Image: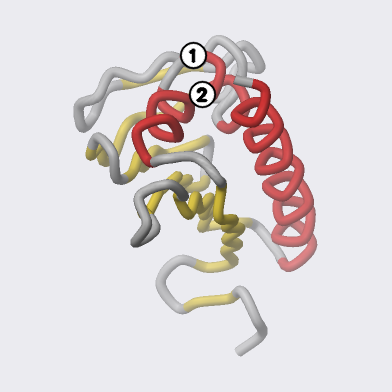
Amino acid sequence: MPTGLTRDAGWQIGVSRTLHHPPSVVWDFISGPEGLALWLGSEAALAPERGAPYRTAAGVTGEVRGYRPMDRIRVTHGTTTLQVAMTPAADGARTMLRFHQEHLASAEDRERRRTHWQHVMDEVEAALDRS
């Protein structure tokens, strides 16, 4: 089976990075308005409850599939499923942040999304470093 293709989730991509910020700072940003705009889409607002719908300014719709504070947010995003998750480093001063998207249409779509998520991660890191 090609890299990135699974039996259950189809084509998928994940991007992760360790950020030099404590988990509470990363969570507050990623789940707040500025962070949501970066990874989910502008004007997206999420209610922290399973089944809650959302819509972005670009017209993408979805619903919350899981919301565990200080851990992960999982949503449908159009025809895909998108998750942002974090893991605290042992020292408590750093946090590994991960973006994962599954049910992508093709290997080409997977590569486009890899570039997208790397760019989003750059933007998240830059925004956190400014704060």
Q: Which residue shows up at 28% across the image and 18% down it?
A: 47
Depth check, front residue: 94 or 76: 94
Q: Position of residue 106 (x, y in %)?
A: 70, 63
| Dot 1 crowding, Cα within 10 Å, few <14, some 14–19, many 20+ | some
- Labels 2 and 1 touching (C-beta < 8 A): yes
Depth check, front residue: 103 or 45: 45
- Would you say 70 lies left or right of 103 here? left
Look at the picture and state if 4 lies above or below 20: below
Residue named by callout 1 = 33
Q: Which residue shows up at 52% across the image and 57% down it?
A: 103
**Kind of residue sitting beneath label 2:** Leu
| SS of the residue under disc 2 | helix
Depth check, front residue: 76 or 13: 13
Look at the picture and state if 115 lies above or below 61: below
Residue named by callout 2 = 36
Which label is found at residue 74? Answer: none
Q: Which residue shows up at 63% across the image and 34% down it?
A: 124
